[in-house]
Structures are given as C-alpha cells and as structure tokens.
Image (cartoon, helix red, strand yellow):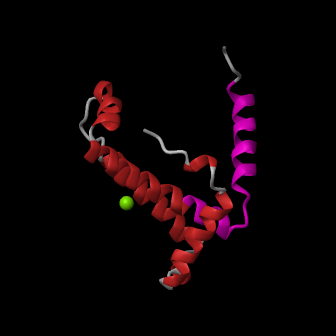
Amino acid sequence: MKSNNDNERTIQSIQKEISDFVSKRDWKRHHNPVNLSEAIIVEAGELLQLFLFKSHGSVEKEAKTESHLRERIEEELADILIYSLELADHLDMDVSEIISKKLNKNSKKHPAVI
Ligand SMILES: [Mg+2]
C-alpha cells in the first residue's frame, strides 16, 4: 500500500534532507556532477540486476507481492532518486520545471493517441 507522504513533502524539503545527510558525512567534496551522474548509472544497474533473468510477464506481480524484492527495488530506486535530486540541486535546476519542460518536449515528439 502506497503511503501518502508524497502529498505532504516538497521536493525542496527532500533535497534539504539529502544535502544535510551528505554534509554531515563530509561527502560534498566527492559529489560533483560527474560523480553524481556515475552514481545514478551504478544505482540504475543495481536496480536492473534485481530483474535479471526474471520473466517479463511475472516481474511486475513479483515486485508488488514479494516483500523482499519490493524492499530491494525501493532501496535502489531511492538511491537513483537521491542522486538525481542531488544533481539537480547541485546544478541549481528546478526539478518541477525540468520535468514539465521534458514532458512538454516529449508530448510534441510523441503526440497522444487516446
Ligand atoms: Mg544501491
């Protein structure tokens, strides 16, 4: 069951939480755009590894019903999102704006069919 936190937190408050976490560990000196981009790819690989050799037909059901798999997917997806939000923050990019701009661009490239 999906919790309701997404309705209560802002992207900015999440980015602040990430920034505080990173600062308290003195990791900011390692977190430049290149390293953050590399980290996103590494974490995306870890996410993909969870699906390795699984049937495409059953993987969605497994991801929704098998608690251990679901927890691992959540962890890797969180890693990707954390690094992505940190990269956007690092480059002074507004996450809502860049997502809307990209969806708008995609809608022109791929017009709605329904
Ligand atoms: Mg990971």
Residue 1 visible: yes
Residue visible at 71% across and 22% down in the picture: 111
Stretch in magenta = 84-110
Residue 14 at what x, y percent from top left? 60, 62
Residue visible at 33% across and 50% down in the picture: 71
Is residue 15 placed above or below 69 in the rendered structure? below
Q: Is residue 3 magenta?
A: no
Residue 87 visible: no
Snapshot quadrant of residue 113: top right
Label count reads 0
Ligand 1 quarter of the rendering: bottom left
Q: Is the magenta region chiefly helix, strand or loop?
A: helix
Quadrant where the image shows the C terminus: top right
Residue 26 at what x, y percent from top left? 51, 85
Is residue 16 placed above or below 98 in the rendered structure? below
Residue 54 at what x, y percent from top left? 25, 35
In the drawing, does residue 65 fall left or right of residue 103?
left
In the drawing, does residue 32 fall left or right of residue 38?
right
Q: Is residue 101 magenta?
A: yes
Is residue 31 placed above or below 71 in the rendered structure? below
Q: Looking at the picture, tell me which residue is in the foreground, 94 or 64.
A: 64
Snapshot quadrant of residue 43: bottom left
Q: Looking at the picture, tell me which residue is in the foreground, 34 or 23.
A: 23
